Amino acid sequence: MRTDLIDSVASVATLEAAYAWLCDRRAKYGPNSDIWDLRHCWPEARSEIAAQLGAGTYQFSPTKVYVIDGEYKEVWTARDALILKAITIVLTPILAPLLKKTCTHVTGGGGPKRAVRQIVRNLNCDSHILRSDIADYY
C-alpha cells in the first residue's frame, strides 16, 4: 500500500496538478520567492522530486517566517507546498469517505456557521461545548 500511495503522489499527473495549483496560489508572490526558481526549472525539478519521493529521500525544509502587519506568517517552501498538495490530492478521495458528516472544517462541510447551527440545534442544559484549534499546537 505504501508504494502505491508514494507512486501516486510522485506520478506526473499528480505532480502536474499540484504544480498548477501552486503556480496559481503563488502567482503574485514577489520576485525573490522560490516559486520562480521552481517554475524556471520545473521539468527537471519534477523528475528530481519524483525520484526523491520514490526513493524515500525527500526531506521537508523549515518554514520561513515573515512578519506582515505585526503578525507572524509561516510559509512552506515552494517544493514542500507542492509535495503537501500532491499528498492532499492522493489522500483526499481515500480519507473523505471516512470523515463524519458532522465534520465542518473540510471543503463543503459548512465551516463555522454550520458548526454553530449544529451546536444550537443540539444544545440542552446538560450539554458541554469544546472548541479546539490545533493550528499552533506543533
Image (spheres, rainbow, N blue to C red):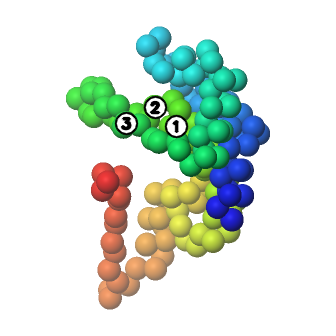
Q: Quadrant of the N terminus?
A: bottom right
**SS for callout 2:** loop
Q: Which mark is residue 129?
A: none
Q: CA distance from mark 2 to mark 3?
A: 7 Å
Name which residue lies at 45% across and 41% down: 60
Q: Which residue is mark 3?
A: 63
Please state the horizontal and vertical placement of residue 136, each as a whole percent of the image.
30, 51
Q: Are marks 2 and 3 in contact (CB under 8 Å)?
A: yes
Name which residue lies at 30% across and 28% down: 66
Q: Quadrant of the C terminus?
A: bottom left
Q: Which residue is mark 1?
A: 81
* Quadrant in the rendering for residue 100: bottom right
Q: Which residue is mark 2?
A: 77
Dot 3 crowding, Cα within 10 Å, few <14, some 14–19, many 20+: few
Q: Are marks 3 and 1 in contact (CB under 8 Å)?
A: no
Q: Earlier in the sequence, mark 3 or mark 1?
A: 3
Q: CA distance from mark 3 to mark 1?
A: 10 Å
Q: What kind of residue is marked 3?
A: Thr
Q: Are marks 2 and 1 in contact (CB under 8 Å)?
A: yes
Q: What kind of residue is marked 1?
A: Ala
Please state the horizontal and vertical placement of residue 16, each as a whole percent of the image.
71, 34
